[in-house]
Amino acid sequence: MSNLLLILIFVVFIIAVIMIVLYFVTLIGYDNVIHFKWEFSKESTDWGYFGSYFASITGLLAFAGVLYTIKISNENNRASEERGTFFKMLELYQKQFDAVTCNGKKSIEAFELYGKKANDDLILYVTLNRLKKIENNEFQVETNESEAINGFKNTLINSNVDISVRKLEQDINGGTFDEYMGCLNDAKEYFDSLTGNMKDEERSQAMGYVGNLIHKENGHFLGQYCRTINNLLQLISNFKESKTYYEIFKDQLSRYELLILLYSALSKQSKLTDVILLKNNYIFENLPIEDIIFIYPKVKDKWDIIHKMTINGILKSKIKYLTNEENIKSKANSYIDEVWAAIK
C-alpha cells in the first residue's frame, strides 16, 4: 500500500510537469518533420488562460501533497500503535515473570533455582541413560570415559542405589532423579567426559527431555510464562521496526530466564515458528557461556565460537525435527483427504 501511494504521487508530479512544459511548446511542421519551438505569448489573454491552466496543475500537486500527508500520518499512527501494543505486552510479560515461584523464592531467584535444577536433571539424564546402555551391553565403554564411569558406578553402589537396567529405565522414563542427587558430583565428572563427543541431535533431544520435565512439573505457571514470550515474539515479527523491538525485549531477559527458555524451546511444547523466531533473532546471544553445561570444558579459549555453534546447532536440530514432523503430518492429512474423497 505504501509503495503504491508513492508511485501514485510520483505519477501525478510527472503529469503536472509535462503539462506545464507542453503549454509553452509550439509544434511546427515543415520538411515532413515536427519541430518543437519554445514561444512565450505577448498577449495578456493568453496569460490569463495560463493562470487558469496553472491552477489546475497546482490542484494536482496539492492532491499529491494530501496523499503524501496521509501516508506519513498512517505511518506515524502505525508506529504509535505498535509502540503501545509492545509496551502493553511487556507489562503482561513482567506480570508473568513476577508470578513465577520456586521453594518460596519469586521472579529472578525462582528462575535461578529452576535453571540449576534443570542443569542437574540434564546431567543425571545423560549419565544415567549412558549407564543404562552400558549395563544392557548396548555398546562398549570408550577409553576416555572408562575411569569416569567406574567412579560414578562405584559411588552409586556405595550409596546403595539400585543400578539395574530395569530400575534405571524406570527412573529415566519417570524423570525421578532425587535418589541420585547425592552422586551429582561424580555424575558431573562423567558428564563432562561425554559431552565433547555428543552430536547436536543428542544434545537437543536431551535438553528437550528436561524441557518436558519442566513443563510437566511446573507447567501451570512456567508454561504460561513461555507462551507469553512466544506470543510477544510473534507479535514483534509483524512490526515495521521489529529489529528495534527485539533488541529492547532481549535486554529485559535475565540469564536464568534465557536458560529456561532454551530448555522450553527444545521441549515437545514448542512450535516450529517459535523456535525459528528464537534462533533468527539471536534471543540466546546474552545467555552466559557458563550456564550452558553442554559446552565442552577443555576448549575454554574458544568458548565464544563454541557458544554460538552449540546453541545454533541445538536449535537447528530442533527445527529440522519439527519440520520433518510437520511434513509427516501434512502427508498424513493429504492421504486422509484422498481416502475420504475416494469414499465419497
Image: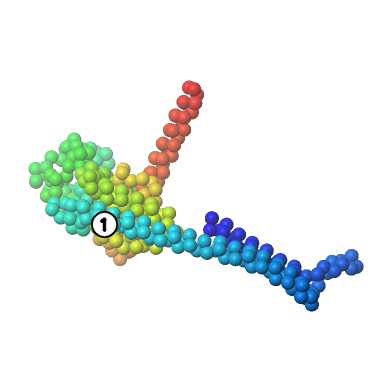
Q: Residue at x 34, y 51 (%)?
A: 230
> Left of 266 or right of it: where is 334?
right
Q: How is the image coloured?
A: rainbow
Q: Position of residue 66 (x, y in %)?
A: 56, 63
Against 336, is 262 above or below?
A: below
| Residue projecting furthest to the top | 343
The part of the image, by quadrant, that contains residue 302 is bottom left
Q: Is residue 12 left or right of residue 79?
A: right
Eyeballing the image, is 110 above or below 129? below
Q: Which of the pair 14/146 is nearer the observer?
A: 14
Question: Which residue lies at the image location 25% right of the left edge and 54% below the top edge?
Answer: 95
From the viewer's perspective, is 18 left or right of 181?
A: right
Side of 279 relative to 71 (left or right):
left
In the rendered image, which residue does mark 1 sit on? 94
Tell me: residue 34, above or below residue 133: below
Question: Nearest the camera: 290 or 85?
Answer: 85
**Residue closest to the eye, 88 or 253:** 88
Residue 123 appears anywhere in the view: no
Quarter-wise, where is residue 16 in the image?
Answer: bottom right
Provide residue 55's location: percent of width, then percent of height: 66, 68
**Could you say where residue 32 lies in the image, as x and y percent from the top left?**
89, 65
Q: Amino acid at mark 1?
A: Gln
